[in-house]
Amino acid sequence: MQDRVIQRRALLLDAALEAFGTRGYHAVTVREICTGARLTERYFYESFKSLEALFSALYLQLNEQLKSATLGALMVAQARTASGPDRERIDALASAGLRVLLEFIRDDPRRARVMLIDAISISHGVGQISGQITREYAELTRGFIEQLFPDADARGIDIAVIATGLLGANIHIATQWVRDGFKPSFEVVLRNNLAIYQALSAFWPKLQPLDTAASAQPPV
């Protein structure tokens, strides 16, 4: 019995990806979802309280898929460059993570519609979920930056702020890429997105520790 419930839920999520991802949340009804899943409305409400609950479940599912793929790519990149110079490690980690994100939305544009466009405009509840997921990705970004720049505090840099800014830039660039019909090319978008991380890497050695910077200031 429970296996059938799980199977029906999966069918509804598949139908939701097709409906939400092609027409948008506000153009879809419960009846359309049920038609796409070949189930009656009774089975819809067996798994979900509302259309918004279904969207939230799909959104979380897609983000889990993206997060898993991102972590896998970062672990591989980290292992390959563990003994390399810092700049090489930064390029490898940033490129691996960005490539996963861009490929994930390019390979199935329906995902992009759900994750990057509709999720931020449906309701306060979905917005809260989106905000929490963004914070989780920012924390993930923060963890890797801390490994690369362990002396951040001494240089007066707040890694949490940097991580939030980098993630915001990644999301904004990806969203605009979707809205522009995936133009320019994948490699151009990846290269320009990566340039932000390369700029951070190049700028870092120029940051003096706080005590050194303070002592270098002329007396007033």
Image: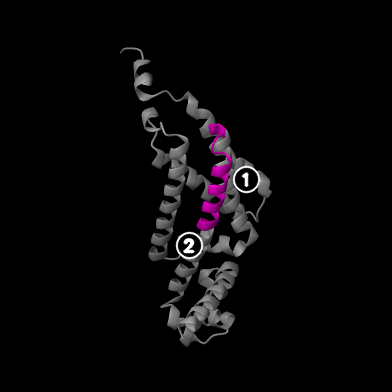
As drawn, which residue projects farthest toward the top? 219
- Amino acid at circle 2: Ala
Q: Is residue 200 above or below residue 20?
A: above
| Residue at image location 34% in from the left, 19% down from the top | 214
| Residue at image location 65% in from the left, 56% down from the top | 181
Determine whether, in the image, residue 24 is placed left or right of residue 149.
right
The answer to which quarter of the image holds residue 14 is: bottom right
The location of residue 215, given as percent across then percent down, is 34, 16
Q: Which residue is mark 1?
A: 190
The answer to which quarter of the image holds residue 105 is: bottom right
Q: Would you say residue 117 is visible in this rendering?
A: no
Disc with the residue nearer the chain's start (2 vs 1): 2
- Residue toward you, 180 or 96: 96
Q: How is the image coloured?
A: one colour
Specify whether residue 69 is painted magenta. yes
Specify whether residue 97 is painted magenta. no
| Residue at image location 61% in from the left, 41% down from the top | 192
- Secondary structure mostly seen in magenta is helix
The answer to which quarter of the image holds residue 113 is: bottom right
* Pointer 1 local density, CA inside 10 Å: few below 14, some 14–19, many at least 20: some
- Residue toward you, 189 or 6: 6
| Residue at image location 50% in from the left, 68% down from the top | 58
* Pointer 2 local density, CA inside 10 Å: few below 14, some 14–19, many at least 20: many
What's drawn in magenta, residue-wise? 67-87
- Nearest to viewer (mark 2 / mark 1): 1
- Residue toward you, 141 or 20: 141
- Residue toward you, 9 or 162: 9
- Amino acid at circle 1: Leu
Q: Which mark is residue 119?
A: 2
- Secondary element at image label 1: helix
- Secondary element at image label 2: helix
